[in-house]
Image (cartoon, helix red, strand yellow):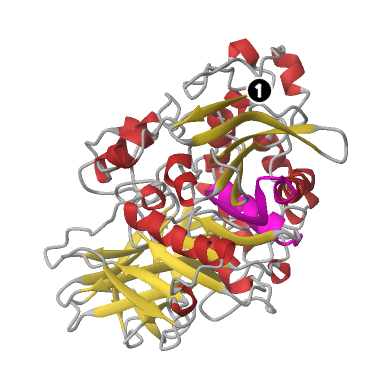
């Protein structure tokens, strides 16, 4: 394969590649993309993705190399299915789609990689750019006029936004493990600031901002500068972007324009949709895919649940086969049986065996029995009947908190869906942060965890709530999913009890007979109690159970406020409970 600096055309194993193809936006900015298509004349349906991570930065690079190695460990066959030379993080491998008669278009979003301009991630301007790129691709002489979107994480998140604008030539969207509410699912879980956004922006966005030029990386895909040939000073680069960590802190409420302008109207989405969520994606890669599926106005939509690390299932043979069936049906019109695909398909988790496959007609599952478990103050236990031992229990917010454990289960218990907990809480200060963790233990009290999207020790489910963010939106709340307004602060009077409704993100587990369910209530992030002696470098963060999705920002959580004493008031026997989705 030949290569050259700047734009140009190459041919590789029957695939024609056009580097840095310009797409002129209505405001004059030129967005750059790479096009991979069959090296034969013809018109092909388009698969597109828009990335902030540098379209010329390979999956195997020093940035994503740990993730690449983990993917290869799970799917060693990947080395036989492709040369992997053109692999780009979170976008389809061109070599595994172009031979099937697709044109792949990989776009650098404005201000990143090879695309000049002002960086304002997930903004209205960036979404309009995406719209224009879709329509540009549909009009190309090599295009059939049908454009599908596909990608993981950010490349799924921006699909919700652009699909709500209804580009005329958008024919399908495959949103894999993203999020859809950037306030509630990315930045402030239950109103508590997540440090992940800082890490993400500083580690993965800034190094590929357009204008780093020779101070950036050389691409091992085609040898060009990943962030363009132009080399700017740090001052010039800083003046050419919205700093995500600064903006995230400055815009405290979900109703602030920074967040509300980024939240799409899901009901306007009409493109056929495949939404893929990760059961272990608590904090980022689960809730949003479900919310997008539920809210989308599409008449043809499917929800798929899988497991393992964030990137793995998108690239496995099975994962790609699923994507190809969906895309071929809607982009090529193939009658491949997709029309009879079950509306909801799940990998169901079993502690003692591999995952099982189950299907359903809707979400939440129509036969769900919403079941309450009550707290016993004297024995720190959970039971189906209200406790005869009311009382109050205190814990230090800096401690491991309180754990309520059920008796050994008499029968297998299938828990699939969203959950919630109602607590009555007082604090020694004017606020408190509540972290609730749904857990499962073996008969000898060893905790069951799974390899999740961000961490190899992911518990069954998480929930979070800042007590001062307890205000509910009654019009959007459901018994199993309280919806918090996040539009003002309701401070606590120290020592006074307050009722809190806490959302627990959806989960899926078949708890065997003899095992025990547990709920932990604490004032800080969950920490896996078992062996943490693993290779942290593979994940890029200490794997303590929550990965990089930690809530330890000292400015957001000053110890004088969030390091005090919290009291659970359990005197009203039926007022406090855990609500679980039990499926017979």
SS at circle 1: loop
Residue 156 falls within the magenta-colored stretch = yes
Q: Position of residue 188 (x, y in %)?
A: 59, 51
Give the camera-side residue of 209 and 562.
209
**Badge 1: residue crowd in 10 Å (few <14, some 14–19, many ≥20):** some
In the image, is residue 74 above or below residue 174? above
Location of residue 75 by image quarter: top left
Give the camera-side residue of 581 and 168.
168
Residue lying furthest front: 41
Magenta stretch: give its range: 137-166
In the image, is residue 71 above or below residue 390? above
Residue lying furthest right: 27
Q: Is residue 413 visible?
A: yes
At horizontal 51% and vertical 62% (from top left) the residue drawn is: 328
Q: Is residue 492 visible?
A: no
Give the camera-side residue of 325 and 515.
325
Q: Position of residue 105 (x, y in %)?
A: 61, 42
In this figure, which residue is indicated by the disc labeled 1? 7
């Amino acid at each position: 394969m030949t290569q050259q600096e700047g734009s140009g055309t190459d041919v590789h194993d029957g695939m024609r590649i056009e580097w840095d193809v310009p797409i002129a936006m209505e405001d004059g900015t030129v967005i750059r993309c790479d096009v991979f298509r069959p090296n034969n004349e013809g018109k092909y349906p388009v698969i597109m993705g828009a990335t902030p991570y540098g379209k010329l930065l390979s999956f195997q690079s020093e940035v994503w190399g740990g993730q690449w190695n983990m993917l290869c460990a799970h799917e060693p066959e990947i080395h036989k299915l492709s040369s992997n030379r053109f692999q780009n993080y979170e976008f389809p491998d061109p070599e595994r789609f172009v031979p099937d008669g697709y044109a792949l278009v990989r776009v650098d979003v404005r201000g990143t990689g090879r695309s000049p301009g002002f960086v304002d991630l997930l903004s209205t301007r960036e979404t309009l750019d995406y719209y224009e790129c879709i329509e540009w691709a549909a009009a190309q002489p090599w295009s059939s006029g049908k454009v599908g979107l596909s990608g993981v994480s950010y490349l799924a998140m921006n699909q919700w936004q652009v699909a709500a604008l209804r580009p005329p030539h958008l024919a399908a969207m495959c949103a894999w493990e993203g999020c859809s509410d950037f306030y509630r699912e990315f930045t402030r879980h239950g109103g508590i600031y997540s440090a992940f956004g800082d890490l993400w922006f500083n580690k993965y966005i800034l190094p590929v901002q357009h204008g780093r030029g020779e101070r950036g990386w050389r691409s091992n895909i085609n040898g060009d500068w990943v962030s363009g040939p132009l080399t700017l000073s740090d001052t010039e680069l800083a003046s050419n972007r919205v700093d995500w960590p600064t903006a995230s802190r400055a815009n405290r409420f979900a109703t602030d324009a920074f967040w509300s302008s980024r939240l799409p109207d899901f009901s306007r989405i009409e493109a056929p949709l495949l939404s893929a969520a990760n059961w272990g994606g608590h904090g980022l890669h689960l809730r949003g895919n479900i919310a997008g599926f539920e809210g989308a106005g599409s008449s043809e939509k499917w929800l798929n649940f899988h497991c393992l690390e964030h990137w793995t299932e998108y690239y496995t043979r099975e994962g790609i086969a699923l994507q190809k069936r969906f895309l071929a049906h809607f982009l090529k019109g193939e009658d491949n049986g997709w029309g009879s695909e079950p509306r909801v398909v799940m990998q169901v988790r079993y502690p003692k065996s591999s995952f099982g496959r189950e299907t359903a007609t809707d979400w939440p599952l129509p036969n769900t029995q919403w079941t309450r478990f009550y707290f016993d103050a004297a024995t720190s236990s959970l039971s189906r009947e209200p406790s005869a031992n009311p009382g109050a229990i205190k814990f230090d917010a800096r401690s491991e908190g309180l754990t309520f454990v059920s008796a050994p289960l008499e029968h297998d218990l299938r828990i699939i869906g969203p959950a919630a907990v109602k607590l009555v809480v007082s604090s020694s200060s004017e606020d408190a942060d509540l972290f609730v963790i749904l857990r499962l233990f073996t008969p000898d009290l060893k905790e069951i965890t799974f390899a999740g999207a961000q961490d190899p020790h992911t518990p069954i489910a998480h929930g979070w709530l800042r007590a001062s963010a307890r205000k509910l939106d009654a019009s959007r709340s459901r018994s199993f999913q309280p919806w918090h307004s996040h539009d003002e602060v309701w401070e606590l009077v120290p020592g006074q009890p307050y009722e809190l409704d806490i959302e627990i993100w959806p989960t899926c587990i078949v708890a065997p007979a003899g095992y025990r369910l547990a709920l932990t209530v604490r004032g800080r992030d969950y920490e896996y109690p078992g062996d943490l002696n693993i290779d942290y470098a593979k994940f890029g963060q200490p794997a303590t159970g929550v990965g990089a999705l930690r809530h330890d920002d000292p400015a957001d959580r000053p110890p004088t406020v969030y390091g005090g004493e919290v009291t659970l008031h359990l005197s009203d026997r039926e007022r406090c409970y855990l609500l679980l989705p039990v499926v017979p």
